[in-house]
Amino acid sequence: MRVVPWKAISLSPLRSCCSGELAFLFYSIKEEMYVASKKTMETLLNSEKLTQNGADLFIQALKQEGVEMMFGYPGGAVLGLYDALYRSPIKHVLARHEQGAIHAAEGYARVSGKPGVVVATSGPGATNLVTGIADAMMDSLPLVVFTGQVASQVIGTDAFQEADIVGITTPITKHNYQVKRVEDLPRIVKEAFYIATTGRPGPVLVDIPKDLTAHSAVPLQPVEVKLRGYCPTVSPDLVQISNLLMALRESERPVILAGAGVLHAKASEELLSFSEQYQVPVAHTLLGLGGFPAQHSLFLGMAGMHGCYTSNMAIYECDLLINIGARFDDRLTGNLSTFAPKAKVAHIDIDLSEIGKNVQTHIPIVGDAKVVLQMVLNETVKGPNTKSWVNHLEKYKKDYPYWYNDTKEYLSPQHLIELVHKTTKGDAIVTTDVGQHQMWAAQCYTFSRPNRWVTSGGLGTMGFGFPAAIGAQLAEPDATVISFVGDGGFQMTLQELILLKEWELPVKVVIVNNGSLGMVRQWQETFYEKRYSQSIFSQQPDFLMLAKSYGIKAYRVSTREEAERVFQDVLKDREPVLIDCWVNPTENVYPMVAPGKGLHEMIGVKP
Ligand SMILES: Cc1ncc(C[n+]2csc(CCOP(=O)(O)OP(=O)(O)O)c2C)c(N)n1
């Protein structure tokens, strides 16, 4: 075996290096060692062209990562990349706005478990991605985002369509790069996928100056990624596992709070076994829904600002709170000074920086939720007797369920969602936008399995729900995909309707139309003495005509009977449909934890 430094590579040393049995090539970039296999080297040597341009290297690197589909929008700085894409088998979804592309990639990532890949041009193309990048960062979605950049020699000169996207996205990406040399591209792409998908998933951005897509280099592939300073902790500290088991044994009123970390770690089965083995009831965060079957007797419901009475009171009254993969955000905790006041807190999270960030933690467990739960399940210790606690919570469930105003005059939005749940047998992939309809969907469309629920939780960005449904349907072509959107938020990204036609996606778009920015209206009603400043729409588009102009069937319903008839019909068909549902315009989301209040101080609770 011979070590050949990168700089020394030329045709002759490569040939002599390949002549022996053990033909490996070591090369070093930025102090990292890589190995090129004999096969790679032979391919090189047999190839007519020893070098490839950056654009071809880019496509090749994507193929090596197993990318089958990407979402994007072309422009000047990425013409070279798109030219290489033209010759490649990778499918490209041409959104009609970069924001649509990135939200679709998020939906794809959420449902498929694979990273969403996005491409956009420099300047405005890149800045149009910013909301989606921030959203993916907040909700821990694995995205690899490629942006074109102006040519290397004009960076920093305010060149046409130049934006410092690396600077702009530094706080909202897990990591970002600007490629400086063509030969770095394969390594950077590999690292980008590795970082986006390992540990706590998140978005990684790679900015590629235009000139590099045309420059050539010898394509040597890194075989593994080794990054100094990045080594996610997967296996937890054993001492903390025994601390958790000891705390569990001593507790009388334990509760699990399960977040999206359970879904990212594919740990739903382990969560179920853990909860059943020790008879510990489970509350979910908004993003965690589906991690534990909603029909299970130990399931309490969603906790937080619009969570159910039982979950919020369980957290308030518990003596042991076991957080699995949730980040204790303010919409979940309410007033921190009265959050879980009687509880010892155990927090299982792959991201060390989450532990103790908002809530004082007594048992910190850093690790992958699946690995941690498997280790806990391997220890068979005597559990607590939670019978009376479970009965106590069961009584709360019976006495304080979600309730809503059911008038003959109007279709109630909650009834609409229950109807869709019934008609789809509770097994659709549901995406939502942001606002009241999102909370009603979270409350009323109960999930029995993971990865059916796609919503924008941390950033809470309007415009997310509909493009996310496109990505979800592309990820699971046979699934029934329902997108509940508000009449406000839908108007932020409705241009993507054309993709339903173009890609033959049978997404059902359900507009929960209350003629207003409902959630804003609710807050103005409750906290601003009904001064409805800029929240009621005076004009609306005709959503039916709009859908028809995109070649999509559309219906309007405003009563229960109409809704029942239309949903029975449209859900049978494998074609896209838009249903404009006129619902009670004054309905509010309850219960609610008002800002500054504790979970036990919910308003709108009715026995
Ligand atoms: C991009 C963006 N802008 C503003 C907001 C603030 N906001 C949160 S909910 C909401 C109202 C949403 O109205 P609509 O889409 O009609 O849904 P509804 O609440 O009526 O169900 C607004 C404006 C937001 N979340 N995202």
Image: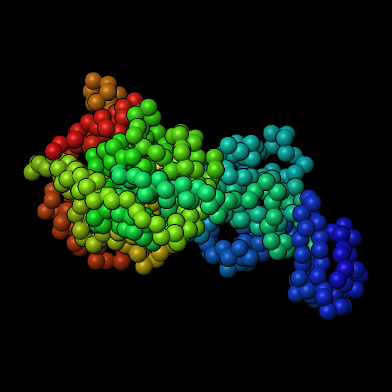
Depth check, front residue: 421 or 368: 368
**Left or right of residue 462, residue 402 in this image:** left
| Residue 253 appears in the rendering | yes
Q: Residue furthest left?
A: 408
Q: Is residue 93 left or right of residue 577?
A: right
Residue 342, position as x, y percentages in the image: 34, 34
Q: Residue 220, percent across and down?
A: 76, 63
Above/below status of 511 relative to 189: above
Decide if residue 267 is on the left or right side of residue 125.
left
Residue occupying the point 31% across, 66% down = 574
Q: Is residue 472 left or right of residue 586?
A: right
Q: Which quarter of the rendered picture does the N terminus lie within?
A: bottom right
Residue 501 picture quarter:
bottom left
Image x and y of residue 181, in percent: 77, 51
| Residue 431 at least partly seen | no
Q: Nearer the viewer, residue 148 or 108?
A: 108
Q: How far across and down, in percent of the image, does residue 480 sit?
A: 32, 62
Residue at figure coordinates x 36%, y 45% from the top left: 250
Which is more toward the observer, 416 or 81?
416
Q: Residue at x 61, y 56 (%)?
A: 194
Q: Quadrant of the C terminus?
A: top left
